Amino acid sequence: MKRFVTAASAATLITLLCACSEPAPSTSALRPVSTIALHYDSLRNSHRYFASVASRYEVEQAFRIGGKVQERKVDVGQVVNEGDVLAVLDDTDYLLAEEAARQRLDAAKAAAWQAEADWLRLKALKKNGSVSASHEEQAHSTLRTARAAAQAEARQFELARNQVNYTLLRAPISGVVTALRMETGQVVAAGQAVITIANEGKPEVVADIPENRLAEFKAARYKASLATEPDRYFDVELRELSAQASAQTRTYRARLKPVEPRQLPLGATATLIAEHTDGGARVATLPATALTQEQGAPAVWTVQQDGAGNSGVVKLVKVAIQGYRSDQVLISGPAEGALIVTAGVQKMAPGLKVALPASESRIDSEEVTR
């Protein structure tokens, strides 16, 4: 009886232990993976350039004569119209020169009138033989000389009068004043730039292009954005490219105008993007997390789907790196449409069977840049 109880207790204990233990893991469970379908597209090289906004028509104004600035009538940022007076020079000396030229002109005219009267008188006396022909010819020559002197003095008077007018500096175009380089009381020389006027209606994006990117820049497509609105791009087109590099920076000045007319603040900071498509090179864009290596060479894990399409076997495939951009990598090598593992690549092993998600994602590489 005692032996029967012991055997029954042992059986009960075994039953309880079996009930408390966890079930053995199923060998049929598959590791789920995140994949992406590979898609190739043309390689686009994108370069950014620091730029600024400037007016297409910008005129530096200067007095045509020298003198002391008597009055400045404009300030930076002021809008002016064609013909408006911008500044005035002291005209005292020029008024005196004009008056002196007027007096010389009156004297020359008087001398010419006197010479004409003398010639006419001698011409009449010549007819009755009172004077010789040589005297009459001499009087005629004196008349021609006096007339020429009067004409010369008339031109000098016009020059003196023009110089008086030049003491007023007028705007040749309508626009906005962008720079001032003189103040009241300052003595300026003839031709010295004192005021800059820009036409606000014709803004352009100006950038300097390095020598090694010049050929690619010419064949690119362009867009720009302002520093105040960095995410709002607008298309621009190349209007002018300097034929000669700057002696200081060895860069070429490019001027681009908006495709659609728009107002841009002059002097604003801008970013110019030049995109060049390489028709021969085709690359695919993958998340950087998909990249691994095999014997020091870059590689990715591909998934070969089974018949049902909800699982597959992974395989390590070497790739060629074509470039990088932020958190993505540009590659070539695997076939179009291949499924690439994008996460958990460190847990993959050759021949490992994995579970695929219900729907596969596909990368859109309409703009592949490096």
Image (tube, helix red, strand yellow):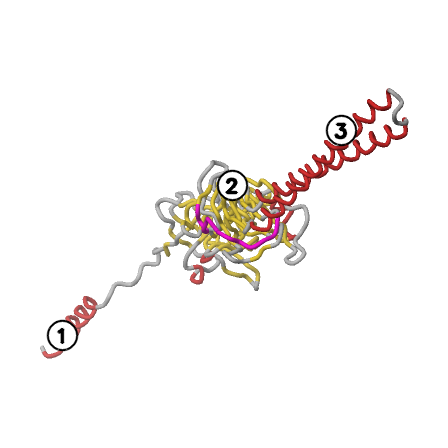
Q: Which residue is mark 3?
A: 117
Classify mark 1: helix, strand or loop. Answer: helix
Dividing the picture into quarters, in which one does residue 362 lie?
top left
Q: Which residue is mark 2?
A: 236
Q: Amino acid at mark 1?
A: Ser
Disc 3 to disc 1, C-alpha distance:
164 Å
Viewer-proximal residue among 138 and 54: 138
Classify mark 3: helix, strand or loop. Answer: helix
Residue at screen point 42% across, 46% down: 232
| Left or right of residue 233: residue 23 | left
| Left or right of residue 15: residue 186 | right
Q: Which residue is mark 1?
A: 9
Viewer-proximal residue among 330 and 101: 101
Viewer-proximal residue among 237 and 40: 237
Q: Extreme bottom residue here?
A: 2
Q: Residues within 10 Å of mark 3 (few under 14, many from 20)?
A: some
Relative image position of residue 272 (x, y in whole percent)? 52, 48
Residue at screen point 46% across, 42% down: 80
